[in-house]
Amino acid sequence: MTEPTDAQVVAAGLGEHAWLTKALAAAARGRAESMDACLHHYGPPAQVEGTRATVRTHFVVCGPDGSPRVEELTRLLAAAVVDFCIPRTRIDEAKRALLDDGSTLQLGRLQQEARDLFTSLTNSGEGGELLLYMLLEVVLRVPQVLCKMPLKTSSQMHVHGADGVHAMAKPDGGLALYWGESKLYADPTDAVRECLDSLAGFLLGGSKAVRRDMLLLRDHAELEDEQLTLALRAFFDEGDARSARVEYRGACLVGFDHADYPDVLKGDEDVQTRVRVAADAWAKTVGRRVGLSKLDKIELEIFCVPFPSVAAYRDAVRQALFL
């Protein structure tokens, strides 16, 4: 008789869904405070009236000289490319190799492989995708269960729809899937419009688009723990009753230019007033576009991130990735 795994023992004690809830939350990697030196969450999240959208505004932290720490942020994002791009089982193999022989060779190879994935996608929005990944997984603690980066580069794989998928167990026994989309534009209205319209084209585009990604999840969703992976994939199996309890949600990163960049941590009352007015305006722009995109019934997490220049941010990301 096969001995039960530790995960099976814990699941039996907690109840399957309570175990899934705890295990999924624990699967989120990184520490939120690791971003504090580069990115500041401004004010409380804004709930957009008449919708299920939550808007969170983040500013790049300024250094002692008042300059936004954009390069420091991009170096942080570049350091996370292995977590973002490489399947967790392969990272585990590299960690075991490190423990076995003390060499970081396998980890180094994964780092190069992750960067090579970006190199082959010269038109990708890597700066937005990486930042959205960090905000969801590291800050909100909603782990990524499918990254499409390795799939996008395969000539045998047709990959459309969202950039990546994150998952969270729901209190009612279901599973919430966050389909990610990111856009970087100079104008905030353009960024919001393009991001939400792109997400709507996928989430509201009919069952075919969603089914395609559900099949990808069934075949490629992966976490370190095999038992957790199997429990998760059951929600993506059309023959399993749990597939009817999956809620589709959206996660958006909208980055845009913001002139006269403020130091939100040290700014005086005048600076704080201008920041508050700007953040309110961005939330209203989101609210209008959510309705126009017909996403008002879908739960959305929307991150607004102003930059001194999104063009400069893109360049800094590529430099940090050695592209």
Image (cartoon, rainbow, N blue to C red):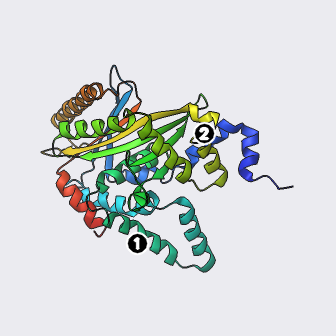
Place residue 175 in its image quadrant.
Answer: top right
- The residue under the point 46% across, 74% down is 109
Front: mark 2 or 1 = 1
**84 vs 198, nearest the viewer:** 198
Q: Is residue 167 left or right of residue 38?
A: right
Numbered label attached to residue 112: 1
Location of the C terminus (image quadrant) = bottom left
Which residue type does callout 1 highlight?
Answer: Gln
Place residue 314 in its image quadrant.
Answer: bottom left
Please state the horizontal and vertical placement of residue 48, each as a whole percent of the image: 32, 25
Numbered label attached to residue 21: 2
**306 vs 227, nearest the viewer:** 227
**109 vs 69, nearest the viewer:** 109
Q: Is residue 249 left or right of residue 46?
A: right
Tag 1: Cα neighbours inside 10 Å, few (<14), some, or many (≥20)?
A: some
Please state the horizontal and vertical placement of residue 52, each as a whole percent of the image: 39, 26
- Nearer-N-terminus badge (2/1): 2
Which residue type does callout 2 highlight?
Answer: Thr
- The residue under the point 17% across, 51% down is 309
Secondary structure, mark 2, is helix
Please state the horizontal and vertical placement of residue 212, each as a whole percent of the image: 46, 44
Please state the horizontal and vertical placement of residue 315, each as a whole percent of the image: 21, 61
